[in-house]
Amino acid sequence: MSVWQTAMTVAATLMGTISGTLLGSVLKSRADRAARVHEWQVSVIGFFGDLVAALSSHYVSMWDLESARIRGDRDEIAAALAASLTTRDAITRPRVQLVVLAPRIRPGVDLAVRAVYAMDTALDEDSRTEDQLKARRLAAKAALEDLEVTMASVMTELGAGLPGDARPARRAKGT
């Protein structure tokens, strides 16, 4: 074999090795990034589920508390108030985790939290009527549903979920 053929064989071998190494590195980097994104999505969905569960529990507690306040039953008010303090406290951690990891949905999170908290009439006894409670309950329910739609849209845009256009439709006003 001539020197020229040997040099070409060595050069081709080196180029193949370098190309393979670079390609492997690029593919591994992409796979690692995809794994990190998936891990982030799983964490965010977990925190979102925790937040929605906590908000739903507080929503029910506030309904019970406000109904007891309307009826004026002191013992029932005391028990419902204690329950509502526990459910309210459960909102803090998943809310903070979610707004830190997914700041894009923070406006929806804040709106849902404020709407559920707004069911409380402790400082506004004049608003303590059946109609006001129903209106605040409906506003809280709408804010929770809007938050779910927002979260689903964000996750779909990021490639989570089933292939195809799986975006949920926006809730119609007044329903």
Image: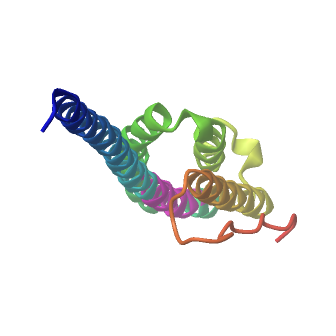
Is residue 164 or residue 148 the one in the foreground?
A: 164
Q: Nearer the viewer, residue 160 or 86?
A: 160
Q: Quadrant of residue 153?
A: bottom right
Residue 125 can be seen in this image: yes
Question: Residue drawn 87% across and 67% down?
Answer: 174
Q: Examine the rendered structure and indicate whether residue 10 appears above or below residue 62.
A: above
Does 7 sit above or below residue 165?
above
Q: Is residue 5 above or below residue 108?
A: above
Work out which quarter of the rendered image holds the N terminus and state it. top left
Quadrant location of the C terminus? bottom right
Residue 12, percent from left and from top: 26, 37
Residue 116 percent location from the top left of the image: 60, 50
Name the residue furthest front. 2
Q: In the image, is 144 to the left or to the right of 32?
A: right
Viewer can see residue 78: no
Magenta stretch, main secondary structure, is helix
Q: Which residue is drawn at 65% across and 44% down?
A: 108
Residue 77 location (% of width, % of height): 47, 56
What is the span of residues highlighted in magenta in the rendered image?
Answer: 51-66
Residue 89 covered by magenta stretch:
no
Q: Position of residue 44 (x, y in %)?
A: 42, 48
Q: Which residue lies furthest to the left in this view?
A: 1
Residue at x 54% of width, y 57% of height: 159
